[in-house]
Image (spheres, rainbow, N blue to C red):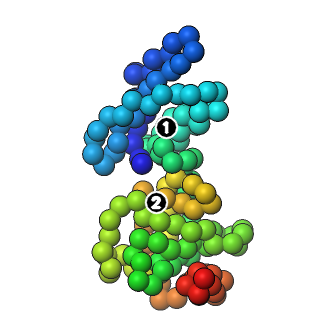
Amino acid sequence: MFGYYDPETLDVQERTAEIDFIEAASGETRRVSISGSSHARQIAHSMGDQCVHKIAAMAGPMRAVRGSMVFLPGDPDSGLIAPEGGSGKPVPLRLAFDVSHGDLPSSGYAIVQGAETDGAILVNRIAIKAAPSPDPALRAAVSGALSA
């Protein structure tokens, strides 16, 4: 879920705290109870992301990645991106918005922004320059994902 923490609504009591989170898609407001110091650090980090990326995520820290990408055949919402510089293996991604088959190029060079959760990126923004074929490592990763 993407949106904005409203710092004006932060309410700190002796042992508890709460803050409003406004969902970007619907504009609905959720009251978030801050339970413990690790949760407080996560929300503080998300508010930092909000300053940098102009949006925050409840799912995890925001991340921007550039590189060759390909959508999985038959699933216009899921794909893999090979980060620029060949640093590591391809990263799974899933779009956080609805698309239909053919709305986006099936492969190309992409810049994605989203929340990192469980090693994947839940994408809230994507820009793709179409390219006919992704790099060989990415093709092999897609083949492996389809046979699994």
Examine the image and state in which quarter residue 23 appears.
Answer: top left
Residue at left 48%, top 43%?
Answer: 58
Residue at left 40%, top 21%?
Answer: 8
Which is more toward the observer, 33 or 103? 33
Determine if residue 125 is in view: no
The answer to whether 32 is drawn above or below residue 123 in the figure is above
Q: Looking at numbered disc 2 in the image, what kind of residue is underneath it? A: Val
Which circle marks residue 97 in the picture? none
* Secondary structure at numbered mark 1: helix
* Secondary structure at numbered mark 2: strand
Q: Is residue 50 left or right of residue 144?
A: left
The answer to whether 1 is drawn above or below residue 108 in the figure is above
Residue at left 49%, top 37%?
Answer: 51
| Contact between labelled residues 2 and 1, with CB atoms less than 8 Å apart | no
Examine the image and state in which quarter residue 105 appears.
Answer: bottom left
Determine if residue 99 is in view: yes
Q: Is residue 146 left or right of residue 106?
A: right
Q: How packed is label 2: few (under 14 Cα within 10 Å), some, or many (20 or more)?
A: many
Q: CA distance from mark 1 to mark 2?
A: 18 Å
Quarter of the C terminus within the rendering: bottom right
Q: Which residue is mark 2?
A: 123
Q: How packed is label 1: few (under 14 Cα within 10 Å), some, or many (20 or more)?
A: few
Residue 115 horizontal/vertical position (percent): 52, 53
Q: Looking at numbered disc 1 in the image, what kind of residue is underneath it? A: Cys
The answer to whether 33 is drawn above or below residue 134 in the figure is above
Q: Which residue is mark 1?
A: 51
Residue 39 horizontal/vertical position (percent): 59, 33
Q: Is residue 76 left or right of residue 36?
A: left
